[in-house]
Amino acid sequence: MKIIYSSACLGYQQPGHPESPQRVQSTYEHLKDLYPFLAPEEIDENILQTVHTGEHVDSVRTGSYHDVDTPYFNNIFDIALLSVAASLTAVNIALEGELVFSLMRPPGHHAKKDSPGGFCYFNNIAIATTYALSKVRSVAIIDFDAHHGNGTQDIFLGHDRVLYLSTHQSPLYPGTGIQSEQNCRNYPLPAGTDEKSYIPVFKQLLNEVHDFNPDMIAVSAGFDAYRGDPLTGMNLDIATFEKIGSMIVGLGKPVFAVLEGGYASELKQCVHSFLRGLESIQP
Ligand SMILES: [Zn+2]
């Protein structure tokens, strides 16, 4: 297991905003003596336009967009690009057959082709998946964040080499993912969903991944379905994420995972639990 991280991702903050640098910093502190850490490899910013419009890329550079949840900072372009770079480094490591987790911010799964949203500027998992598709035939994206990855769905709807699958609380921001559409398989769950009712649904989701038989699995790893999360009403336990990780790696495919949400102070334990699950079976 390798972890991709750069402390540069801590370099922006809006006071009171739940997507704080402390969430990632404390996770880094918790894991730093347990796993090897690697810095993101440098990338060319042109790769952003493999999923985003040029107008969107420019709007993140200049702040000419409007989204109250996703504030503009004068260094956000470089930090969001670094978060994308970390996800691409993760793909390269997964292609070598190693497990890998990108511990970076900002998250990405709410960023659409042409707009930011929900604390996300560029869609890390979508750009990484598009890059992976230059190396392998097909990728399944498993998104267990408590919010629907509307940006990822926007980017890949109808793509025949990508299967997007999401479990998420509904109703909840962003309000999408109420039903499956084509290659985007949505599993909306009521507030209060606990491990006992979550795991059978997740097994059903994994059956779809198994049938798709992808060459690689990309994971939008959000931990806000944890019962202590201040932004959602889901009731998963810290140990549930170990089960999720173990079930994903049990598919026997190369896996890379990228941090999305998770706003409780127990984020570090939730991430650690997930990593233990991924390591439970050697691929
Ligand atoms: Zn979320």
Image: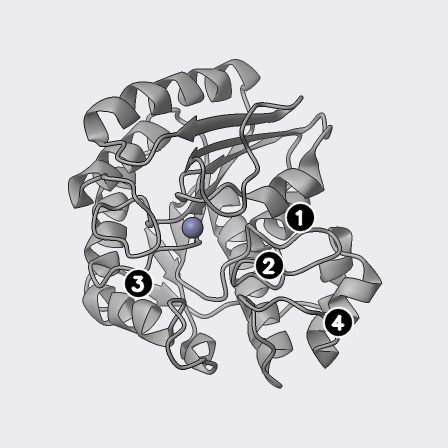
Query: Dot 2 corresponds to which residue?
Result: 117
Q: Earlier in the sequence, mark 3 or mark 2?
A: 3
Classify 39 as above or below 118: below
Q: CA distance from mark 3 to mark 1?
A: 24 Å
Secondary element type, mark 1: helix
Which numbered marker is on residue 131? Answer: 1
Q: CA distance from mark 4 to mark 1?
A: 23 Å
Q: Is mark 2 within 8 Å of ligand 1?
A: no
Q: Earlier in the sequence, mark 4 or mark 1?
A: 4
Q: Give the label, 3 or 4, closer to the camera.
A: 4
Secondary element type, mark 2: loop
Q: Earlier in the sequence, mark 4 or mark 2?
A: 4
Res 281 visible = no
Query: Dot 4 corresponds to which residue?
Result: 59
Query: Dot 3 corresponds to which residue?
Result: 36
Q: Give the label, 3 or 1, closer to the camera.
A: 1
Q: CA distance from mark 3 to mark 4?
A: 35 Å
Q: Give the label, 3 or 2, closer to the camera.
A: 2
Residue neighbourhood size for the residue with mark 4, other residues' Cα within 10 Å, grouped as few (<14), some (14–19), many (≥20): some
Query: Residue 271 at what x, y percent from top left?
Result: 27, 52
Q: Nearer the viewer, residue 236 or 53?
A: 236
Classify residue 59 as left or right of residue 15.
right
Q: CA distance from mark 1 to mark 2?
A: 22 Å
Which residue lies at the image location 39% right of the left edge and 43% below the top edge?
146
Classify residue 80 as left or right of residue 194.
right
At label 1, which amino acid type do we have? Tyr
Q: Quadrant of the C terminus?
A: top left
At label 4, which amino acid type do we have? Ser
Q: Earlier in the sequence, mark 1 or mark 2?
A: 2
Q: Quadrant of residue 10?
A: bottom left
